[in-house]
Image: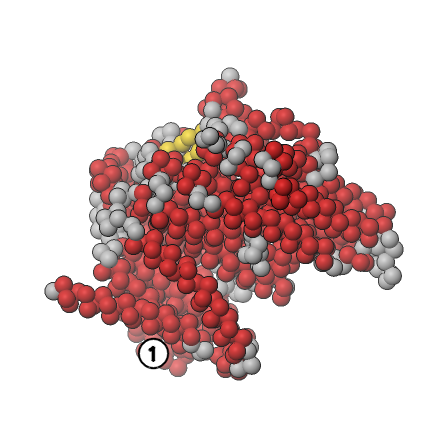
Amino acid sequence: MLQAVIADSHWAIILILLPLAAAVLCFLYARAANIIGVMTLSALVLSVAALGWQIRETGVYHHAIGGWEAPLGIGLYADGLSLLMLTITAVAGLGISIYATSYFKQQDAARFWPLWLLLLASLNALYLSADIFNLYITLELVGLAAVALAALTGGRDALAGAMRYLLATLLGSLAYLLGVALLYHGFGSVDIAILATQAEPVPVLWVAFGLMGAGLALKMALVPLHFWLPATHASAAAPVSALLSALVIKGAFYILLRLWLEIFAPHSGGAETLLGLLGSAAVIWGSLQALRQTRLKLLIAYSTVAQLGYLFIAFPLSTMAGAAVWSAAGYLALSHALAKAAMFLAAGNLMRFGGHDRIADLDRVVQRLPLTAGAFALAGVSIIGLPPSGGFVGKWLLLEAALTQGRWELVVVIILGSLLAAAYVFKVLGRAFTQAPVCQKARAVPARMEWAALLLACGAILLGFLAPFILPLMDIGDPFSASGVQP
Amino acid sequence: MTLLAWGFDGLLLLGLLGLAWKALNSTDLFSAIALFIAFGLLMALVWVRLEAPDIALAEAAIGAGLSGALLLAALARLRGMEGNVTSNTGVEEAPNNIDARLVQWLSAILLLPVLFGLVYGVLSLPGNAVGLSAEINANLAASGVSNPVTAVLLNFRAYDTLLEVFVLLLALIAIWSMGSIQFNRSIETIGKTSLETTSSVLDTLVYLLVPVLMMVAAYLLWVGAHAPGGAFQAGSVLAAACVLLLLAGWPLHRLLTAMRLRLLAVAGPVVFVSMAAYSLIAEGALLQFPPEHAGTLILLLETVAALSIAVTLAALFSGGQGQHE
């Protein structure tokens, strides 16, 4: 009975409509925003679980909105890849939300929740859309909400960072939209599945891919388009930094990956080499910059630039071993989301505690704030890619693919990136044990904020053991098969 | 005739490029905004020439009209904050002149290949696009309206519009989250600085124009079912009436207290989401309208959406959040 209900319900639609309604509620009744928000997030985690069960039992979810089938109407579509991204959003989102209930004062909470719930709804809508124009609208919503969240603290740095972010994200959206227009004109549809069958290697396809790829790369801050990310992510409020680094960036990556797999991969013409090259540059450059930083939040932000590079290294490897490499990239995205959220939340705790984020003056936080220091260390383990963690599984699968294909340059980049990550994580942890020269007054940090960071970090570690369970879920509906090799 | 059309199109194109260039190059923010508004009006003409009257209406009302008003309101507030903004930018630019030039040239060189790529891509397209008009016309009868644009926006792709309505609400929430200006006080600053001396002329204008604008909005809403028009156009015309009232110093804030303003702003999104949820339960698909009721449902959706759009745009213009009782 229960099983029939779960199998027949529209969980995917709940994932979109529920946060929209909750955002409106929070906007009207600001006083209850915390409760509404956490309850919504909890409901969303359950809905994602139900959706996972549903598509594992009955195959991919497809819904023709308005009853109009594809070229005319818009489709919703959920397979293993969508499920992965929805899971990342719901789980990391819940952790960050619980943290936010303690972090924000009443007045700020009233401003935070409607924006975050709208961001959540648009991310979910993005992961479920099967239509490139609809994806554009979700991309706009995501960008606008993210910019407003980044400006929430209201300081000079935050406003400047948010303005730069706004210009970057608008430019990215416009480039993407231009690509949509070209594809529609060239192939007469905006439905991804139809485009996949219609696409031919003609100039308009390459121009469209160039525009969409560049726009999305700008939104993902792929080196050399990363100029906006560090300032924006470092100057935002801690929960917002976590949302931006862990979740928002992944939205653009999902679109790029989906378009690549379905439409562009068969006609790529060597674009994957360029993407791999930029990804490698991002890993090295981002890590080196992270190592140079003296502020903790800037260090973590540059680490995001570096870790995103790994997702692009998967592109050149995927031509030979499609599905395995994309599973690795998906796993990396998942564990990065949890670990990076934990790191930013831990940094928020440290800032609340000491009133600053200067790495040199961390002053024995290991003894004074053990849970937070533990959260940072565990998240660091996953970011570096040490066993047993989610980051290890992802990097190991990627490394294995590079080794079997004899791509030694990528092997070197992957290992070097890990070594550099170890260097910058230990740079922070080392300072956490030593006494700082100046004496500092310390403020109490609510236990909830410490536990939220620690639990997210533990999640990133736990992923190391869950691979046999999660990897098959990712493969539901064969999302990665399109780039499989024809020998 | 064709020669005349070619000449007209050529003039439009040159005018567009020239206005865009002047607007980007202008050091005076006020004249840049004026040029931007003129650009929007020419753009509306271009849409007319491209036989897209719906977009032309939207462009004229939103692109030229309300965006221009929003920019001017922002400029007025900037000037109120830190003296004369325009003279500031003029002075600051002098020492950085060479740097700015270098950046301009570098970006121009970087953009050239993009331009060539675009031109090449567009020229390689087949002249007559495949498009979906055949499909749309085949299903028009079941959509409840006879204007294909409205059929697409409110029925075939109503989900897009649902999200778009939330974009507008999000913009309002985003702007309100940046600061807390009182609804009435912000209007006073705009009204007093620019328009107090001309109040009797303005009052007459308000008495004449506001009823007309309301009529036009209602007409656009109604006519959207079978001719160019619809919620966005009607909403922005209604918003223009609100802006006019605000400028003339009408005490709109007494009518739109904080909670009423919020309720009106969310009315459109709420009705959309409720209808989506209801249709999922009753019809089995998100935003599926039974053909016999589709026309009524679309009109209902559009009316509420137009109200929310108007209130939201007017609130964006005033910048304030409304007075708490």
Q: Which residue is outermost to the left?
A: B1
Residue at coordinates 62% horizontally, 59% vertically from top-left?
A: A231
Position above or below: B88 against A157: below
Residue B1 picture location, percent across and down? 11, 65
Q: Is residue A221 visible to us here?
A: yes
Query: What residue did someone put label 1 on?
Result: B200
Q: Nearer the viewer, residue A476 or A416?
A: A416
Which residue corresponds to the image point at 38% horizontal and 74% vertical from the top-left? Answer: B22
Q: Secondary structure at mark 1?
A: helix
Q: Is residue B284 left or right of residue A255?
A: left
Residue A466 location in percent, x, y? 66, 29
Q: Chain of mark 1?
A: B
Image color mode: secondary structure
Position of residue A164 measured from the top left corner of the image (x, y, whole percent) = 55, 62
Image height of B194 relative to A47, above or below: below
Q: Residues within 10 Å of mark 1 (few under 14, many from 20)?
A: few
- Residue B251 can be seen in this image: no
